[in-house]
Amino acid sequence: MKKLVSICLALVLCAWAFAAPASAKKEKKTVTTVFVTDIECDHCVKKIMDNVPSLGKGIKDVRVDLPKKEVTVVYDASKNDDANIVEGFASLKVKAEPKKAGAEK
């Protein structure tokens, strides 16, 4: 009987130990990246805003600054990354790259 209780306790502890990392993976990390683009007109802004899903999964917010030619994207890092978003811009025929830290135009 003691062996059966010990085995059950060991199984419960193992299940708990393996379940803990799964919950840690579910943590969402929100990232904000500013992309320098080649947009030139209101039509370009409309094209981006009308096709936000093309930028990939996990997009939370998109803001376009036409005078600066910048697009700020807020996204869930567990579902997307900068490289994928650049590909999304390319699918819209918009050239984009993440803005370098400290770079000003």
Image: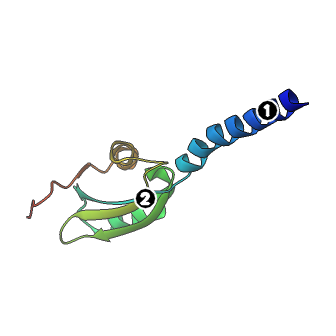
Dot 1: few (<14), some (14–19), or many (≥20) neighbours within 10 Å?
few
Q: Which mark is residue 25?
A: none
- Within the image, what quadrant is residue 16 found in? top right
Is there any visible trace of residue 82 in the rendered image?
yes
Residue at x 38%, y 47% (from the top left corner): 81
Mark 2 belongs to which amino acid? Tyr
Dot 2: few (<14), some (14–19), or many (≥20) neighbours within 10 Å?
many
Where is residue 90 shown, x and y percent of the image? 34, 44
Residue at x 29%, y 63% (from the top left corner): 71
Q: Is 9 situated left or right of 32 in this image?
A: right
Residue position for label 1: 6
Question: Which quadrant does the N terminus fall into?
Answer: top right
Question: Which quadrant does the C terminus fall into?
Answer: bottom left
Q: Is 98 situated left or right of 80 in this image?
A: left
Q: Is the residue 105 above or below the residue 14 in the image? A: below
Q: Which one is nearer the viewer's eye here, 21 or 52? A: 21
Residue at x 10%, y 61% (from the top left corner): 102
Furthest residue toward front: 2
The number of numbered badges drawn on the structure is 2
Q: Which mark is residue 75?
A: 2
Where is residue 21 shown, x and y percent of the image? 56, 42
Q: Is the residue 4 above or below the residue 65 in the image? A: above
Where is residue 17 shown, x and y percent of the image? 63, 39
Instruction: Give SS at disc 2.
Output: strand
Q: Which one is nearer the viewer's eye here, 22 or 14? A: 14
Foreground: disc 1 or disc 2: 1
- Per the model, the C-alpha gap separating discs 1 and 2 is 46 Å
Furthest residue toward right: 1
- Looking at the image, what colour scheme do you see? rainbow
